[in-house]
Amino acid sequence: MFTSKSELFLNFVQLFPHPDCVLSLSKTIIKNRIRANTNKKISNIMAEKKAIQILEIAKNSYPAVSQNDVLCDQLKAYAKRYQELLQQKECCINKMVFIAEQRAEYSIILSLPGIEPNTAVRLMSEIGDITRFANNKQLNAYAGIDIRRFQSGKTFYKDKINKGGNKHLRKLLFLIIQNMIKLRCYGRNHNIEYYDKLKTQSYNKCHKVASIACVNKLLKLLLHLITHNIHYDYRLAA
């Protein structure tokens, strides 16, 4: 009904930390509170629908404490503190974007489908100066996705990624690929076409293996684009 990081959710938890706080109010009051506690435009119909859902959930809940319990006060305090931290995070990211806009690679990274300013500045901060890598193999090793092979006599073990590099970068790159997969309908993307190719019957790679292979392709593409100072163009990319 609400995402746990949304402003509306955190405001709502502070207003109504207990089901009884909701049950004592009418549907109209709850609807108006919903509309008043979000910066997003929400219609009367949608707000009323959410109000009905909230009342239904409150009726079917079985709280372990009363609405006057100290745990309700703690919940309100935690929600407020979490909200403050999210605001600080957003402020920090905005400052990072302002600094990143002065660098040439920022616009190049943004030219890739599925990458927004938030992701772009995080990627830049984790990689640093990408031109210091002589080739994509060094960049793969830095991200920890280079292949580690085990062999004992005539026995060959399944290849695995090294996981010895920057784990934050590795996680971020994996999430970027997942976003690209979700947003495939908004434009053609060579990385996603490569993912689909790996998932076909002849290759039949599992989702995680195919995603890591796409991370490898993405890093190679990023290194090429930034080194040569060119933006991503599906018609030109190989």
Image (spheres, rainbow, N blue to C red):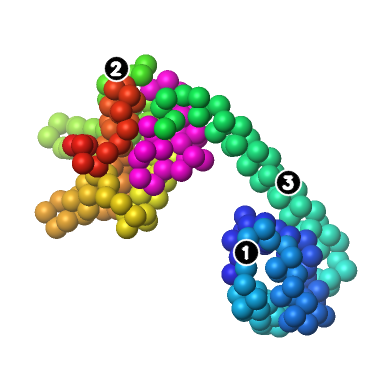
Crowding at label 2, few (<14), some or many (≥20) Cα neighbours within 10 Å?
A: few
Q: Nearer the viewer, residue 95 or 215?
A: 95
Which residue does the image show at 29% across and 17% down from the upper left?
134
Q: Which mark is residue 41?
A: 1
Magenta segment boundaries in residue numbering = 108-130
> Left or right: 73 with respect to 84?
right
The secondary element bearing badge 2 is classed as loop
Mark 3 vs mark 1: which is more N-terminal?
1
The residue pinned by badge 3 equals 84
Relative to 47, residue 203 above or below = above
Q: Which numbered disc flags the more N-terminal residue, 3 or 2?
A: 3
Q: Is residue 2 visible?
A: yes
Q: Is residue 117 magenta?
A: yes
Q: Nearer the viewer, residue 56 or 52?
A: 52
Magenta-span inclusion, residue 209: no
Tag 3: amino acid: Glu
Q: Secondary structure at mark 1?
A: loop
Distance from the alpha carbon under mark 2 to that under mark 1: 49 Å
Question: Circles 3 and 2: CB distance less than 8 Å?
Answer: no
The amino acid type of the residue labelled 2 equals Ala
Residue drawn at (30%, 36%) of the image: 232
Q: Nearer the viewer, residue 68 or 185?
A: 185
Label disc, if present, on residue 134 of the rendered structure: 2
